[in-house]
């Protein structure tokens, strides 16, 4: 009897060993993304781009807007293919700018592009156009909003869908600073729209305007508490500096051009943090991981980081100062990594070998 039990036990042990060694499903396959320490601090994802402005993560690869007027589709193997966008007017800081996917992109394949175009009176305007992306092609689905003031400078261009499902759009003052205080103008604002361009019923002024008094906002990101943070270019020229990080509230006035820095005025908001008069970030994006807010610096030539604490930001850090030149966009990828774009071929930088680039950054190894 004992021999029979021993034989049965031996058979069971042998069977279990064979199962573990030969059945791939018996043990979970390690996923290197579960351990961010296995991911290199820096990886070059794409090179040879021309003024890349924004990134969307699609089908295991990337769609990158180039300010010159095309979307570059980059697959997971690094192969690139350009898709030209008709009607883009490249002028100064304008051109093809932001890109954002619809929250239901996997089912409806809709995405949005922010572009500079000829205006109705042969002037420059900015507009948001919705497209459908299928089988590697983009088809125009319609204009979501137009008649946004445009100019050679200060065109805004960042778009994000918020936790409320609404589309938020940043617009610049188009070098006419007074329009930032004009609630009837779409310039110098953060706009809020439904996904088809309709005005949400709870917008503060019955228009697309969500907040106003902005100079050239180019970064939007929500924290874990649902608070909206924005980065914004301050004054330029000889009197540079005064770049801003703002906590955005519904209907609030952020003061441009009446106040800047620590200046105050009744009914106007001061920034959560600014660069001061002697330092210029030229912040061009915003991305949040946990309580860490990251943004790219163009003139500052750095990846910046601050810590969010309630309704304030502290502990400003600079990463890669001067290493990659002008850094524009920072996006959080589906793998939890940061993806940044350089902007050294925009006429204001010094192109390095391979510029412009998309670079993957491991935030846990900064």
Image: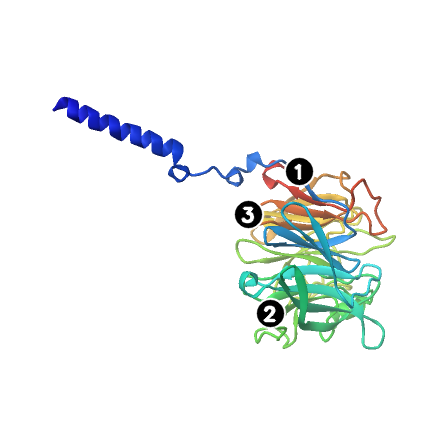
Q: Position of residue 113 (x, y in %)?
A: 69, 64
Which comes before the other along the chain, label 1 or label 3? 1
Q: CA distance from mark 3 to mark 2?
A: 27 Å
Task: Answer whether residue 211 is visible to the viewer in this image.
Answer: no
Quarter where residue 115 is shown: bottom right
Crowding at mark 3 (Cα within 10 Å: few <14, some 14-19, many 20+): few
Quarter where residue 109 is shown: bottom right
Which comes before the other along the chain, label 3 or label 2? 2
Quick check: marks 1 and 2 in contact, CB under 8 Å?
Answer: no
Give the residue at the far left of this rendering: 1
**Nearer the observer, disc 1 or disc 3?**
1
Quarter where residue 186 is shown: bottom right
Residue of label 3:
290
Residue at 60 percent of width and 69 percent of height: 195
Relative to 345, 266 lies left or right = left
**Nearer the observer, disc 3 or disc 2?**
2
Residue of label 1:
42
Which comes before the other along the chain, label 1 or label 2? 1
> Is the N terminus in the top left, top right, bottom left or bottom right quadrant?
top left
Q: Position of residue 286 (x, y in %)?
A: 66, 52
104 vs 338: above or below? below
77 vs 152: above or below? above
Is label 1 in a helix, a strand or a loop?
strand
């Amino acid at each position: 009897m004992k021999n029979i039990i021993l034989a049965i036990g031996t058979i069971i042990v042998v069977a279990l060993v064979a199962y573990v060694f030969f059945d791939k499903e018996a043990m979970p396959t390690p996923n290197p993304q579960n351990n961010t320490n296995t991911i290199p601090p820096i990886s070059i994802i794409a090179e040879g781009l021309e003024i890349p402005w924004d990134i969307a993560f699609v089908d295991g690869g990337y769609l990158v807007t180039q300010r010159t007027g095309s979307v570059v589709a980059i697959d997971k193997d690094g192969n690139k293919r350009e898709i030209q966008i008709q009607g883009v007017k490249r002028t100064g800081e304008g051109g093809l700018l932001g890109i954002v996917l619809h929250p239901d992109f996997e089912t409806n394949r809709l995405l949005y592009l922010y572009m500079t175009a000829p205006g109705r009176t042969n002037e420059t305007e900015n507009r948001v156009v919705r497209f459908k992306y299928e089988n590697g092609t983009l088809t125009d689905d319609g204009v979501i909003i137009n008649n946004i003031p445009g100019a050679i400078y200060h065109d805004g261009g960042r778009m994000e869908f918020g936790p409320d499902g609404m589309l938020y759009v940043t617009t610049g003052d188009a070098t006419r600073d007074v329009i930032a205080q004009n609630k009837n103008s779409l310039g110098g604002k953060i706009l809020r729209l439904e996904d088809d361009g309709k005005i949400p019923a709870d917008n503060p002024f019955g228009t697309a305007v969500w907040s106003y008094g902005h100079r050239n906002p180019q970064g939007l990101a929500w924290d874990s508490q649902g608070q909206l943070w924005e980065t914004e270019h301050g004054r330029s020229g000889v009197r540079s500096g005064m770049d801003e990080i703002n906590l955005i509230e519904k209907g609030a006035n952020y003061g441009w051009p009446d106040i800047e820095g620590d200046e105050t005025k009744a009914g106007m908001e001061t920034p959560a943090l600014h660069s001061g008069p002697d330092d210029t970030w030229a912040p061009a994006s915003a991305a949040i991981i946990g309580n860490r807010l990251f943004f790219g610096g163009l003139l500052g030539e750095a990846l910046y980081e601050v810590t969010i604490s309630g309704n304030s930001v502290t502990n400003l850090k600079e990463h890669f100062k001067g290493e990659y030149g002008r850094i524009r966009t920072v996006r959080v990828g589906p793998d939890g990594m940061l993806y940044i774009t350089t902007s050294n071929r925009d006429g204001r930088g010094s192109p390095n070998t391979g510029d412009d680039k998309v670079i993957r950054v491991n935030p846990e190894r900064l």
